DNA sequence: TCAATATAGTTCGACTGACTGACTAGTTCA
DNA sequence: TGAACTAGTCAGTCAGTCGAACTATATTGA
């Protein structure tokens, strides 16, 4: 619009978009692709929100409260998501032997069989990114993000 | 758990988490912080989904269809979000002089007054990241993400 | 020991966000 | 002009989310 080429003004210098936005764009693309890969594999009875919770379930089961905390939702929301996952046969609730109030949410075989689909797509994405950026930039990207996690992830202690 | 220090095995090498996950973590933190900053400033009648749409509105107004496409939601969803934004006084719908079917969604003064709050928090975050990573890594991060946008953003043409 | 308090999880009710399908009104083009 | 297309809305449905209130078990302290 204001295209008058003022004599001495430097080249218009496209305003660097906020790094957070760039990150959001890439992260959204990843989610879209993983969801699409699952659907292509015939898995359409699990939603993104459910998958996010399921991804947090540990080897020997995890308490609902912990899932809620790590997925950053309330207990009520986690209950609802786990309900659906349970109804679809992806998780089961078993009593926690160490606390009568608590129950452990565990992945079923059905859920574990799904993992390779998601992981496979993740690896495919990672390969594509490396091909686009080159190994050096990819390494730098990983390094920066790993470092950034220290100040952006409240739950960076588990695997 | 499997802590047996086998003689020749290299240091256990923590499995590099998927880069997409790292990006998701950082992006989520950004969103949380911007939302919190808005709330701290007394703005609590606008949701994240609404803000995402509002952020796509151009200087002279944008068509609902374009907003929907860029925000990656259906027209119906965009209609609903714009309805709420309009009810809260953040946007207005005016006829598109160039197409009788269309209407342009425009930000009101009330919405424009909010921008500095969000932008301010973004800049604060960016500064913190730069302080944590150092200028060199920050530059590399920005470079990698900008490059990545070419293959992850279907709408990378506008500002 | 046992009452007060805290914690794990659920249920209920309300709202937002998101989608599909069906519709109205205006535009394009053959 | 009329058929096909496009912009936007309305209606209906469901998932996700939260706050509040509740049950059952655990913990604590006088």
Image (cartoon, coloured by chain):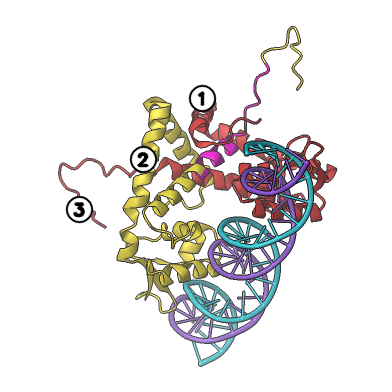
Chain colours: A red, B yellow, C purple, D cyan
Q: Residue at x 40, y 49 (%)?
A: B37
The subunit letter for the residue under badge 1 reads A
- Image spot of residue A12 (x, y percent): 27, 44
Whether B19 is among the magenta residues is yes
Residue lying farthest to the left in this orientation: A7
**Residue of label 3:** A4
Say which residue label 2 marks: B124
Residues tagged 1 and 2 counted as in contact (Cβ below 8 A): no
- Quadrant containing the N terminus of chain B is top right
Question: Which residues fall within the magenta stretch?
Answer: B12-28
Please tell me whether mark 1 or mark 2 is closer to you in this view: 2
Given residues C2 and A96, the one toward you in this image is C2
Dot 2 lies on which element? helix
Residue B68 on the magenta segment: no
Give the labeled residue for mark 1: A136
Callout 3 touching callout 1 (CB < 8 Å): no
Q: Chain of mark 3?
A: A
């Amino acid at each position: 619009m204001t295209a008058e080429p003022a004599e001495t003004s430097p080249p218009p210098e496209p305003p660097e978009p906020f790094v957070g936005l760039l990150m959001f764009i890439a992260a959204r693309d990843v989610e879209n692709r993983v969801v699409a890969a699952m659907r292509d594999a015939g898995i359409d009875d699990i939603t993104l929100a459910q998958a996010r919770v399921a991804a947090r379930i540990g080897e020997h089961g995890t308490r609902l409260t912990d899932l809620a905390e790590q997925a950053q939702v309330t207990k009520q929301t986690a209950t609802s998501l786990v309900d659906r996952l349970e109804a679809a046969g992806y998780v089961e609730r078993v009593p926690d032997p160490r606390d009568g109030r608590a129950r452990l949410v565990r992945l079923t075989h059905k859920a574990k069989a799904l993992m390779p689909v998601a992981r496979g797509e993740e690896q495919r994405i990672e390969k594509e990114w490396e091909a686009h950026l080159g190994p050096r930039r990819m390494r730098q990207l990983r390094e920066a993000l790993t470092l950034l996690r220290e100040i952006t992830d409240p739950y960076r202690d588990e695997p």
